[in-house]
Structure formats: C-alpha cells, structure tokens
Amino acid sequence: MLKKLWKDPVFRYGLISSAVWVLVCHAYAFFNDLFSHDALNALYASGVEERWKVELGRFVFPVYRTIFRGALATPWIIGLLTIVWVTLAVYVLAKVFGLQTFAPIFFAAGILAVNRTMFCLGATYLYELDIDMLSVFLAVLSVYIWKSSGRFGFLWGALPLVGTLGIYQCNISVAAVLVIFVLVLALVRGELNAKEAFRKGLLSLAMFVIAALIYLVILKLISWVFGIEPVSGYYNSITNALAPKTRGIFSLLVGMYRDYRKTVFYWPTTYPSVLVMCAVLLSLLASVAQLMWLAVRKKASRNEKCWALLLAAALLLLLPAASNLAYVLNNGDVHDLMKYAVWMVFLLAVAEQAMATSMLLMEQMEVTRLSTLTKPMQVTRMPTSPSRPNPSAAEN
C-alpha cells in the first residue's frame, strides 16, 4: 500500500508540500514546550479530560489518544501526525479535483495547513492540532467517496463523516463546502446538467443526515453503556444544536453571513487592513471570472448554460451558510476553531485553475488529432532506375 502510494507523484507532491507548509508555519510549536491556556489542562489526558471530551460529543478523542499518541501531549509527535493527516487530506483532495501537477497541490496544501484556525490550534490548542486534521481528512474522504462511488456513494461517504463529528463537529462544514465546489465545477464544465447536479446535491444531503443519525445513535450507546451524558450549558456543548435559540432564526441567518464576511475580509495582521481586503477581493473576483470563462467554453445550448449558471450561482450563495453553519446551531457563539471551513473558499481558485489547464490540454490534443486526420496524405514517388537495353534487340 505504501509503495503504491509512493509511486504516485500526486502523493509525493502532497507529502512534500504538506511537510514544507506545516514545518515552516508551525515548527515553533513542535520543538518547544509552549503550552498555554487549555493546553495546560490537557498536557496529560487524565480520566477527567477523556470524560470531558466524550461529554462534548467527541468520543473519538480517547480512542485516538490510545492508538496514536498516548496520554501525554508530546509536541514533536503531534507535529508528525499533523503532517501525516494533512498529507492524506491533500492527496484525497487532489483526487477529488483532479490536481496533477506540483503547483496546484502545493497551494492546496498551503490553504489546508496555513490559516487562522491552524495558527490558533498550534499556538494555544496544540493538543488538538493533529486530531483536528484527522477530522478534516475524514471530511475530505467522505466527499471523495460520495463523488466517485456511484449510486450508493452517499451511503459509504456517511461513515467517514461520523468520525469527523466524533472529533470536532464543526469540521463537517469542510465536507459541505467541498460538495458545493464539486457541484459548481461539474456544472460549469458540463459534466452534470442542472437536473443531475440537483439530484447529486440531494444525495449529499442524505449523506449528511445519515452521518448525523449514526452519530446520535453512538452517543446514545455511550450514554447507555458508560453512563456518560452529553454536557449542556456550555458554549461548545453538542446539545446547543437542538436547544431553543435565544435569537430569532432570521437574526441568526443574517448574523451568519455577516460573520462570514468579517472572517474572510478582516484579518488581525500587522499589514494594513485595506491591503488585506483588496487582496482577498481580487482573489475572489478572479475565482468568479475563472468560473465564467469555464462556463463560456462549455459546449452546450444556451438554455442549458443558463440553468447551469443559475444553479451554480445559487450554490455559491449558500457557501457562507455551509462554511459557518455552527453560527446558527450554536446561537451565534463561535470562535476561530469553529471556522476552519471558511478558509476553503480560497481552494476554489486552485481547483478552477487545474480544471482550466486540463480543458486547454484536452482541446489542444483534440486539435492535433483532427489536424492529423484531415491533413492530405503526400505520396512520395520512388525514383525509377533507367531501363536497360534489351540485348536481343541490340543484336538484331
């Protein structure tokens, strides 16, 4: 299995890219003992810490620590495991969007490994960095299975999502964002028409519902077997999702979009905020322009193109909701660790560029093939040797 992976250049690109980004941006945390805040309480995962994670609905934590890491939060081991999970997430992501060359894989790894959520994890919640990346990998894997496993892919894709929910519930939004990107790119390229994309989207919703139901059943089994009930009354309690909201649903929906805009455009950096906003805006506009270019080059009737563009636009309008769903479920109480999926918005441009490159290459190959078929054949006439005189004729 490992030999087969290593022979795949996409995996090698993903490993190199992930290691570079993770080490350059987070190595300070892996080679020091800079524990602070909640990391001090979880430096050694006692029974109290393990029970607390299960009460929060994160029942995978104790199993993960037992198998991979042990009770002690050792920074260098956390760093190695982080590189492993980011590499696998990048590799599967490359399969989802058809990333084949080094450049797009390198930038995709950068988006996954370098963002505000990752900085917060590395600086303050180091003990959760590696396992949160496992939850991201499982979310990406679920989308890959849903996309590539045929009619019943949504059933098998629900299984990795259960793992995501059992680690950090908010990271299920990563899968939701990637589903939107897959559908949008399939629409503008012509791989799916509007009806097929709508049906595929409904199957993805079924995948999320099935994963949530399995997750709730596991929580009930844990409560029945071990007597551990989900805790309530805290800002990060899983029970908040089903609890009555103190704010109106309309207020929460508006606040969700506002919080998304604030998160994407207003970064707490030393650079002037105007420059940051302009850079983000240019990146998003370039992404939209690339989508329009892909849609224009699609070979389809005008009616089909219009329906495809309308559905793609509707899906993109749902992107803030998919990325920041925790805002509504948690009554507007969110922080940076809950917003990892928000940074996936910059991944769309990478996927678009890879798709555009692939389309241009296929068009060039088609032009070359047609020119070869239609090129008139040139018949080269072999030179003939001069005829020899007939000896009998000469004698006569």
Image: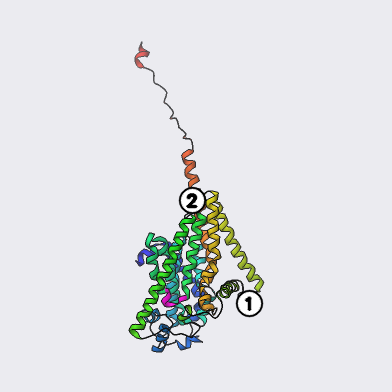
Q: Which residue is at a point 56% across and 79% down the rendered structure image? A: 247
- The residue that label 1 is drawn on is 270
Residue 362: numbered disc: 2
Residue most extreme to the top: 396
Q: Which residue is at a point 52% across and 56% down the rendered structure image? A: 188
Q: Nearer the viewer, residue 258 or 249?
A: 249
Quarter occupied by residue 216: bottom left
**Magenta-colored segment: predominant secondary structure:** helix
Q: Position of residue 141 (x, y in %)?
A: 42, 67
What is the C-alpha distance between the residues marked 2 and 1?
A: 44 Å
- Image quarter in which the N terminus is found: bottom left
Q: Position of residue 35 (x, y in %)?
A: 49, 86
Q: Which residues are magenta?
A: 164-169
| Secondary structure of residue under mark 2 | helix
- Indicate the amino acid at tag 2: Met
Q: Which residue is at a point 37% across and 66% down the rendered structure image? A: 156
Is any atom of residue 25 visible in this view? Answer: no
Q: Residues within 10 Å of mark 1 (few under 14, many from 20)?
A: few
Q: Position of residue 123 (x, y in %)?
A: 52, 81
